[in-house]
Image (cartoon, rainbow, N blue to C red):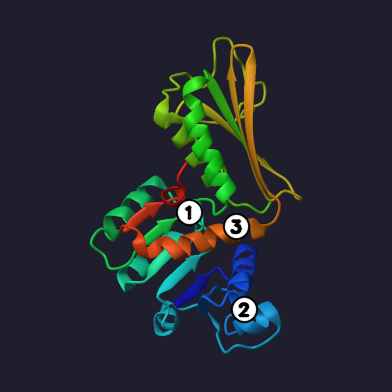
Amino acid sequence: MKKIAVFGICGKMGREMSAELLKDGRFEIVAGFDRCDVGSDIGEMLTGKKNGRRVYDDYDDIASSGADLILDFTGPGIVYKNIIWAIDTSIDIIVGATGLKNQELDDIKKRSEGARSKVLIVPNFSIGAVLMIKVSRLLSRYFDDCEVIELHHNKKKDAPSGTSIATIEALTENKDYDREQFVSKEEEKIKGARGGFKNGLHVHSVRLPGLLAHQQVIFGTKGQTLTIRHDSINRSSFYPGVIMAIENIDSLDSFTYGLDSFIDL
Protein backbone atom coordinates (compact mmCIF):
# COMPACT_ATOMS: atom_id res chain seq x y z
CA MET A 1 0.00 0.00 0.00
CA LYS A 2 1.36 3.41 -0.97
CA LYS A 3 1.92 5.71 1.99
CA ILE A 4 1.25 9.21 0.71
CA ALA A 5 2.08 12.68 2.00
CA VAL A 6 -0.06 15.36 0.36
CA PHE A 7 1.68 18.72 -0.06
CA GLY A 8 -0.71 21.65 -0.33
CA ILE A 9 -3.38 19.57 1.39
CA CYS A 10 -5.29 22.63 2.57
CA GLY A 11 -5.74 24.08 -0.91
CA LYS A 12 -8.76 23.32 -3.07
CA MET A 13 -7.04 20.69 -5.20
CA GLY A 14 -5.24 19.16 -2.23
CA ARG A 15 -8.42 18.90 -0.19
CA GLU A 16 -10.53 17.37 -2.95
CA MET A 17 -7.93 14.83 -4.08
CA SER A 18 -7.14 13.89 -0.46
CA ALA A 19 -10.82 13.38 0.32
CA GLU A 20 -11.06 11.01 -2.65
CA LEU A 21 -7.91 9.14 -1.58
CA LEU A 22 -9.30 8.64 1.92
CA LYS A 23 -12.22 6.76 0.37
CA ASP A 24 -9.85 4.57 -1.65
CA GLY A 25 -8.65 1.56 0.32
CA ARG A 26 -5.60 1.06 -1.92
CA PHE A 27 -3.72 4.05 -0.51
CA GLU A 28 -2.98 5.63 2.86
CA ILE A 29 -2.45 9.33 3.54
CA VAL A 30 0.13 9.39 6.34
CA ALA A 31 0.73 13.16 6.46
CA GLY A 32 -0.13 16.52 5.01
CA PHE A 33 2.19 19.45 4.39
CA ASP A 34 0.96 23.04 4.35
CA ARG A 35 1.36 26.40 6.04
CA CYS A 36 -2.34 26.42 6.93
CA ASP A 37 -4.11 24.34 9.61
CA VAL A 38 -0.79 23.01 10.91
CA GLY A 39 -1.39 20.30 13.52
CA SER A 40 -4.92 19.58 12.32
CA ASP A 41 -6.13 15.99 12.09
CA ILE A 42 -6.47 15.18 8.38
CA GLY A 43 -9.44 12.88 8.80
CA GLU A 44 -11.34 15.43 10.86
CA MET A 45 -10.46 18.24 8.44
CA LEU A 46 -11.71 16.33 5.38
CA THR A 47 -14.43 14.01 6.67
CA GLY A 48 -15.23 15.10 10.21
CA LYS A 49 -13.82 11.85 11.60
CA LYS A 50 -10.36 11.79 13.22
CA ASN A 51 -7.76 9.35 11.86
CA GLY A 52 -4.63 10.40 13.75
CA ARG A 53 -2.81 11.74 10.67
CA ARG A 54 -1.77 15.37 10.82
CA VAL A 55 -0.81 18.42 8.78
CA TYR A 56 2.80 19.58 9.19
CA ASP A 57 4.87 22.52 8.00
CA ASP A 58 8.29 20.92 8.53
CA TYR A 59 10.08 18.55 6.16
CA ASP A 60 11.46 16.56 9.10
CA ASP A 61 7.94 15.61 10.13
CA ILE A 62 7.21 14.36 6.61
CA ALA A 63 10.41 12.30 6.64
CA SER A 64 9.33 10.76 9.98
CA SER A 65 5.82 9.97 8.72
CA GLY A 66 6.93 6.93 6.72
CA ALA A 67 5.68 8.39 3.43
CA ASP A 68 7.07 6.72 0.31
CA LEU A 69 5.26 9.04 -2.12
CA ILE A 70 4.51 12.77 -2.18
CA LEU A 71 1.60 14.27 -4.08
CA ASP A 72 2.40 17.95 -4.53
CA PHE A 73 -0.43 20.42 -5.15
CA THR A 74 1.42 23.52 -3.92
CA GLY A 75 2.51 26.35 -6.19
CA PRO A 76 5.38 28.13 -7.95
CA GLY A 77 6.75 29.66 -4.76
CA ILE A 78 7.71 26.37 -3.11
CA VAL A 79 7.25 23.46 -5.51
CA TYR A 80 10.85 23.49 -6.78
CA LYS A 81 12.17 23.36 -3.21
CA ASN A 82 9.78 20.48 -2.44
CA ILE A 83 10.99 18.45 -5.42
CA ILE A 84 14.67 18.91 -4.57
CA TRP A 85 13.98 17.88 -0.98
CA ALA A 86 12.12 14.75 -2.16
CA ILE A 87 15.02 13.78 -4.43
CA ASP A 88 17.55 14.33 -1.63
CA THR A 89 15.37 12.34 0.79
CA SER A 90 14.74 9.46 -1.67
CA ILE A 91 10.95 9.86 -1.69
CA ASP A 92 9.03 9.55 -4.97
CA ILE A 93 7.10 12.68 -5.90
CA ILE A 94 4.19 13.38 -8.26
CA VAL A 95 3.83 17.09 -8.95
CA GLY A 96 0.53 18.64 -9.99
CA ALA A 97 1.72 22.20 -9.43
CA THR A 98 2.54 24.32 -12.49
CA GLY A 99 4.78 27.34 -12.91
CA LEU A 100 8.19 25.62 -12.88
CA LYS A 101 10.75 27.48 -14.96
CA ASN A 102 12.67 25.73 -17.74
CA GLN A 103 15.95 26.04 -15.86
CA GLU A 104 14.31 24.53 -12.79
CA LEU A 105 12.99 21.61 -14.84
CA ASP A 106 16.46 21.06 -16.31
CA ASP A 107 17.99 21.08 -12.84
CA ILE A 108 15.36 18.67 -11.50
CA LYS A 109 16.00 16.29 -14.38
CA LYS A 110 19.77 16.34 -13.77
CA ARG A 111 19.41 15.89 -10.02
CA SER A 112 17.02 12.97 -10.46
CA GLU A 113 19.46 11.03 -12.63
CA GLY A 114 20.84 8.21 -10.53
CA ALA A 115 18.68 9.19 -7.55
CA ARG A 116 16.60 6.63 -5.67
CA SER A 117 13.45 8.72 -5.97
CA LYS A 118 11.32 9.20 -9.07
CA VAL A 119 9.91 12.51 -10.21
CA LEU A 120 6.70 12.76 -12.25
CA ILE A 121 5.65 16.27 -13.32
CA VAL A 122 2.00 16.45 -14.43
CA PRO A 123 0.85 19.81 -15.88
CA ASN A 124 -2.73 18.50 -16.02
CA PHE A 125 -4.20 15.42 -14.36
CA SER A 126 -7.22 15.42 -16.65
CA ILE A 127 -7.00 12.46 -19.02
CA GLY A 128 -9.21 14.38 -21.45
CA ALA A 129 -6.72 17.25 -21.52
CA VAL A 130 -3.87 14.83 -22.23
CA LEU A 131 -5.87 13.36 -25.13
CA MET A 132 -6.54 16.88 -26.41
CA ILE A 133 -2.79 17.53 -26.56
CA LYS A 134 -2.10 14.22 -28.28
CA VAL A 135 -4.80 14.80 -30.91
CA SER A 136 -3.57 18.36 -31.47
CA ARG A 137 -0.07 17.04 -32.13
CA LEU A 138 -1.46 14.71 -34.83
CA LEU A 139 -3.57 17.40 -36.48
CA SER A 140 -0.87 20.08 -36.57
CA ARG A 141 0.61 18.62 -39.78
CA TYR A 142 -2.56 19.36 -41.75
CA PHE A 143 -3.27 22.99 -40.87
CA ASP A 144 -1.41 26.17 -41.72
CA ASP A 145 -1.97 27.94 -38.42
CA CYS A 146 -3.22 27.50 -34.91
CA GLU A 147 -3.99 29.48 -31.76
CA VAL A 148 -4.62 28.34 -28.21
CA ILE A 149 -7.13 29.85 -25.79
CA GLU A 150 -7.01 28.70 -22.17
CA LEU A 151 -9.58 29.70 -19.58
CA HIS A 152 -9.19 29.25 -15.82
CA HIS A 153 -10.61 30.45 -12.52
CA ASN A 154 -9.53 33.87 -11.31
CA LYS A 155 -7.41 32.45 -8.46
CA LYS A 156 -4.90 30.78 -10.78
CA LYS A 157 -1.48 32.29 -10.18
CA ASP A 158 0.31 31.58 -13.47
CA ALA A 159 -0.48 32.48 -17.06
CA PRO A 160 -0.45 30.95 -19.54
CA SER A 161 -1.31 27.58 -18.01
CA GLY A 162 1.11 24.69 -17.96
CA THR A 163 -1.33 22.76 -20.14
CA SER A 164 -1.35 25.44 -22.84
CA ILE A 165 2.46 25.57 -22.86
CA ALA A 166 2.60 21.77 -23.14
CA THR A 167 0.08 21.99 -26.01
CA ILE A 168 2.18 24.50 -27.94
CA GLU A 169 5.29 22.39 -27.46
CA ALA A 170 3.41 19.33 -28.73
CA LEU A 171 2.01 21.23 -31.73
CA THR A 172 5.47 22.30 -32.84
CA GLU A 173 6.97 18.81 -32.62
CA ASN A 174 5.57 17.90 -36.06
CA LYS A 175 5.36 21.33 -37.66
CA ASP A 176 7.49 24.45 -37.73
CA TYR A 177 5.21 27.48 -37.38
CA ASP A 178 7.88 29.81 -38.70
CA ARG A 179 6.16 33.16 -38.37
CA GLU A 180 6.58 36.49 -36.67
CA GLN A 181 4.38 37.51 -33.76
CA PHE A 182 2.58 40.09 -35.90
CA VAL A 183 1.73 39.72 -39.57
CA SER A 184 2.45 42.54 -42.01
CA LYS A 185 0.63 45.77 -41.10
CA GLU A 186 -0.99 44.13 -38.06
CA GLU A 187 -1.26 46.55 -35.14
CA GLU A 188 -2.11 45.91 -31.49
CA LYS A 189 -4.21 48.90 -30.43
CA ILE A 190 -4.17 47.57 -26.87
CA LYS A 191 -0.87 45.96 -25.84
CA GLY A 192 -1.27 42.21 -25.41
CA ALA A 193 -4.47 41.99 -27.44
CA ARG A 194 -2.95 39.25 -29.60
CA GLY A 195 -1.94 37.29 -26.51
CA GLY A 196 1.36 35.64 -25.70
CA PHE A 197 3.64 34.17 -28.35
CA LYS A 198 5.68 30.97 -28.21
CA ASN A 199 7.21 28.78 -30.94
CA GLY A 200 5.37 30.75 -33.62
CA LEU A 201 1.92 30.39 -31.99
CA HIS A 202 -0.31 32.73 -30.05
CA VAL A 203 -1.77 31.75 -26.67
CA HIS A 204 -4.53 33.66 -24.90
CA SER A 205 -5.30 33.43 -21.17
CA VAL A 206 -8.73 34.16 -19.69
CA ARG A 207 -9.26 34.40 -15.90
CA LEU A 208 -12.81 34.63 -14.56
CA PRO A 209 -14.81 33.47 -11.53
CA GLY A 210 -17.09 30.58 -12.46
CA LEU A 211 -14.46 28.88 -14.62
CA LEU A 212 -12.33 25.93 -13.55
CA ALA A 213 -10.01 24.65 -16.34
CA HIS A 214 -10.82 24.89 -20.04
CA GLN A 215 -8.88 25.03 -23.30
CA GLN A 216 -9.52 25.45 -27.00
CA VAL A 217 -7.06 24.61 -29.75
CA ILE A 218 -8.24 26.33 -32.93
CA PHE A 219 -6.70 25.21 -36.24
CA GLY A 220 -7.10 27.26 -39.41
CA THR A 221 -6.31 26.77 -43.05
CA LYS A 222 -7.80 27.98 -46.31
CA GLY A 223 -11.59 28.00 -46.10
CA GLN A 224 -11.94 26.06 -42.84
CA THR A 225 -11.21 25.83 -39.13
CA LEU A 226 -11.18 22.95 -36.68
CA THR A 227 -11.60 23.43 -32.93
CA ILE A 228 -10.74 20.97 -30.18
CA ARG A 229 -12.05 21.93 -26.76
CA HIS A 230 -11.68 20.35 -23.36
CA ASP A 231 -13.56 21.37 -20.20
CA SER A 232 -12.97 20.32 -16.62
CA ILE A 233 -16.30 21.06 -14.95
CA ASN A 234 -15.14 20.23 -11.43
CA ARG A 235 -11.99 18.97 -9.75
CA SER A 236 -13.22 15.38 -9.60
CA SER A 237 -12.16 15.23 -13.28
CA PHE A 238 -8.53 15.15 -12.11
CA TYR A 239 -8.85 12.14 -9.81
CA PRO A 240 -8.59 9.37 -12.47
CA GLY A 241 -5.34 10.97 -13.65
CA VAL A 242 -4.02 11.12 -10.09
CA ILE A 243 -4.73 7.41 -9.69
CA MET A 244 -3.12 6.67 -13.06
CA ALA A 245 0.02 8.51 -11.92
CA ILE A 246 0.17 6.72 -8.56
CA GLU A 247 -0.35 3.29 -10.11
CA ASN A 248 2.35 3.80 -12.74
CA ILE A 249 5.11 5.71 -10.96
CA ASP A 250 6.98 2.55 -9.94
CA SER A 251 7.47 1.63 -13.61
CA LEU A 252 8.88 5.02 -14.63
CA ASP A 253 12.40 6.26 -15.17
CA SER A 254 13.89 8.77 -12.76
CA PHE A 255 12.21 11.79 -14.44
CA THR A 256 8.96 11.85 -16.43
CA TYR A 257 6.91 14.79 -17.71
CA GLY A 258 3.17 14.38 -18.24
CA LEU A 259 0.74 11.46 -18.32
CA ASP A 260 1.54 10.80 -21.99
CA SER A 261 3.62 7.75 -21.14
CA PHE A 262 0.52 5.95 -19.87
CA ILE A 263 -1.85 6.77 -22.75
CA ASP A 264 -1.49 4.99 -26.09
CA LEU A 265 -3.14 6.75 -29.02
Q: Which mark is residue 238?
A: 3
> Would you name the residue on which mark 2 appears?
37
Q: Provide residue 223's location: percent of width, then percent of height.
A: 64, 12
Which is nearer the N-term, disc 2 or disc 3? 2
* Type of the residue with mark 2: Asp
**CA separation in Å, label 3 and label 1:** 11 Å
Which of the two discs, 3 and 1, sits closer to the camera? 3
Nearest to the observer: residue 138 or residue 18:
138
Nearest to the observer: residue 226 or residue 4:
226
Q: Provide residue 31's location: percent of width, then percent of height.
A: 51, 80
Secondary structure beneath label 3: helix
> Would you name the residue on which mark 1 appears?
122
Q: Which mark is residue 109?
A: none
Decide if residue 208 is in sight here. yes
Instruction: Say few, some or many: other residues with alpha carbon within 10 Å of mark 1 (under 14 / 14 to 19 / 20 or more).
Output: many
| Residue at 44% from the left image edge and 36% from the top image edge | 169
Which is nearer the N-term, disc 2 or disc 1? 2
Secondary structure beneath label 2: loop
Which is nearer the N-term, disc 3 or disc 1? 1
| Residue at 69% from the left image edge and 80% from the top image edge | 47
| Residue at 62% from the left image edge and 52% from the top image edge | 156
Q: Is residue 248 above or below residue 18?
A: above
